[in-house]
Amino acid sequence: MAAAFGTVFMPEMAITWFDGSNWSVPEMVSSDSISLHPGAHVLHYSSTCFEGLKAFRHADGSVNIFRMDRNIARLSQSSRLLGLPALDDASVARMIKDTVARFADEVPAPPGSLYIRPTHFGTEPAIGKAAVPSVTSCFYVLVSPVGDYFAGGDKALRLLLEDQGMRCAPHMGMIKSGGNYASALQPIMRARDSVQADQVLFCPGGDVQETGAANFLLIDGNEIITKALDESFLHGVTRESILTLAQDMGMQVSEREITVDELLQRAAKPGCEAALSGTAAVLAPVGTLIYQARNMP
Ligand SMILES: *Cc1c(COP(=O)(O)O)cnc(C)c1O
């Protein structure tokens, strides 16, 4: 049995600290631990954001990072929306490339990859700053070799449609920030316990959005339907890549609102499939939608 996704780390990572005026020169340090003041802003007010991207080994042996520019742009946006110090995109790119290059020999062969977790958070020791951004911060690039996400059996997922609650506050949806996952945890734990769902598909007020960490796609014959971008959900790089490929293949791409009613109607027809998209899950097939205690294959 392979180690669980994201539990094995390479021993070093690139790191830089912002002191309020300048970023320190990035260094390669041990990834065993970092030192933080117990009053650090992130530990109290969740001033944190991260990214998830992958480096792949190609047939010619070279190691290539998938669409790094998109993740760096999203990290900058997350940092800005959280009031964290601005990152320098070129420096972030260099730190990601340096960390991947450092462990290039250990990038697993496909379907494995090196999962890259850039992380940025507020470090200012100031527990009175509940409504004020952290002046100082830390940014590092942690990497983790991952195997086949589906090694445990490529079984179709059970999704609970949740139309009462929401994953996170609507204005936080497009920020890849720790607090959003904490916010989604209760409904996900409840769905696991009560109906053995693998994931919750959040559909606040009947508007089909996304799951806890992946986007939702409905594939109905030649049409692929997914929610249009707004600030309420995370704009996945995988989602964007799949929509581009689908368009190139001649499929009709519909980015628009889809209601729970329409989803259930379409899903009941033959030739209609659903999937979750994300860097970790890639494209994971949905087998069952559960709504108001009813199972719909
Ligand atoms: C990371 C994430 C996704 C998928 O984004 P990718 O860029 O495709 O990996 C979707 N939804 C949420 C909530 C996420 O955290």
Image (tube, grey):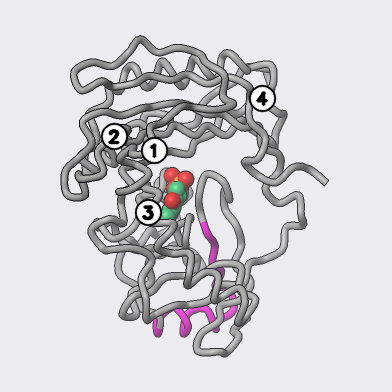
Q: Position of residue 15 (x, y in %)?
A: 43, 20
Going from N to C along the chain, the mark reached first, 4 or 3, is 4
Labels 1 and 2 touching (C-beta < 8 A): yes
Q: Is residue 119 above or below residue 279?
A: above
> Where's residue 152, x and y in %?
76, 54
Residue 213 lies left or right of residue 145; in this view the side is: left
Distance between the Cα atoms at labels 1 and 2?
7 Å
Q: Nearer the viewer, mark 3 or mark 1?
A: 1
Q: Nearer the viewer, residue 52 or 33?
A: 33
Q: Which is in the foreground here, disc 4 or disc 2?
A: 2
Q: Measure the C-alpha gap from mark 1 to mark 4.
A: 35 Å
Q: Helix, strand or loop at disc 3?
A: helix
Please, what is the three-letter code of the amino acid marked with disc 1?
A: Pro
Ligand 1 under 8 Å from disc 1 Cβ: no
Which amino acid, mark 4? Answer: Val
Label disc, if present, on residue 179 of the rendered structure: 3
Q: Which residue is mark 1?
A: 38
Mark 4, other Cα within 10 Å: few <14 / some 14–19 / many ≥20: many
Mark 4 and mark 2 lie on one chain; the one further toward the N terminus is: 4
Which label is found at residue 125?
2
Say whether marks 3 and 1 touch (CB < 8 Å): no
Magenta residues span: 261-276
